[in-house]
Image (cartoon, rainbow, N blue to C red):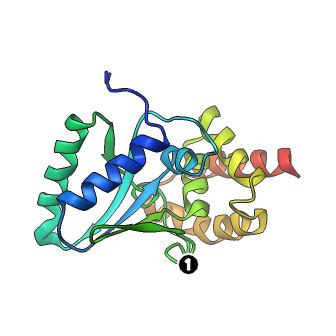
Amino acid sequence: MSFRPNVDRGRIERFLQELGRAFRHPARLYIVGGAVLVHQRLRLATLDIHLSIEVDGLHHGNLMRQIARLKDQLPVNVEEASPADFIPMPSGWRERSPYVGRFGQIDVFYFDPVSTALSKLDRGHDDDLAAVRTVLAAGKIARADLVSAWEEIAPRLPERGRSATQIAEFEENVNLVLNVLG
């Protein structure tokens, strides 16, 4: 259990600014999950900042050291995580990742909201389902895009070791969220 305070929009901004000052190499960061909702002012706070990181392999260790230093200095919870760790990525995910801004040499994006929604539906916790309903209701993703992405990745789930039962539960969550909004 962490004793660091919850992360609000100001903490996310400060973290990005400080990281941009400290890390002096090109990189792409994708803000993932609850931190996106907080940064977009759809939620007040979250427990941590999840990031998907793309950086030259030579500089990855340095970037991670800077993140670790800032976690203690600010204090803020930061973890490397991506929907790609859990589900196959639907085509076009990079193009659907909205640009946030440049911090030093780091380009920051929100991770594709469609892929993020699918990863939350895969996990299926009540708060995950509520988050997907929030982004759908706020118009951050279109219902048709979610359906299309689900149809694209579903046949690839067995390649990721998913059983028929797990795939059926995932599909049930997709339908549950879509039917509530329908």
- Please give the name of the residue rendered at 41% of the width and 46% of the height, measured from the top-left corner: 12
Q: Position of residue 150 (x, y in %)?
A: 65, 64
Is 38 rendered above or below residue 55?
above
Position of residue 107 in the picture relative to residue 128 (left or right): left
Residue toward you, 51 or 121: 51
Element type where label 1 sits in the image: loop
* Most foreground residue, 162 or 78: 78
**Which residue shows up at 32% across the image and 21% down it?**
1
Q: Quadrant of residue 128?
A: top right
Q: Is residue 161 visible?
A: no
**Are there few (<14), some (14-19), or many (20+) residues within 10 Å of tag 1?**
few
Horizontal side of 58 relative to 87 (left or right) equals left
Tell me the residue that label 1 is attached to: 92
- Give the percent coordinates (x, y) of residue 72: 20, 35
x%, y% of residue 161? 44, 56
Please say whether residue 64 is visible from this viewpoint: yes
**Residue 26 image-quadrant placement:** bottom left
- Name above or below for residue 177 compared with residue 160: above
> How many labels were placed on the picture?
1
Amino acid bearing label 1 = Gly
Residue 94 position within the rendered picture, expressed as x and y whole percent measured from the top left = 49, 75
Closer to the camera in the image, 32 or 161: 32
Is 127 rendered above or below residue 122?
above
- Residue at image coords 48%, 46%: 35
Q: Residue at x 52, y 35 (%)?
A: 45
On screen, residue 1 versus residue 136, left or right, reads left
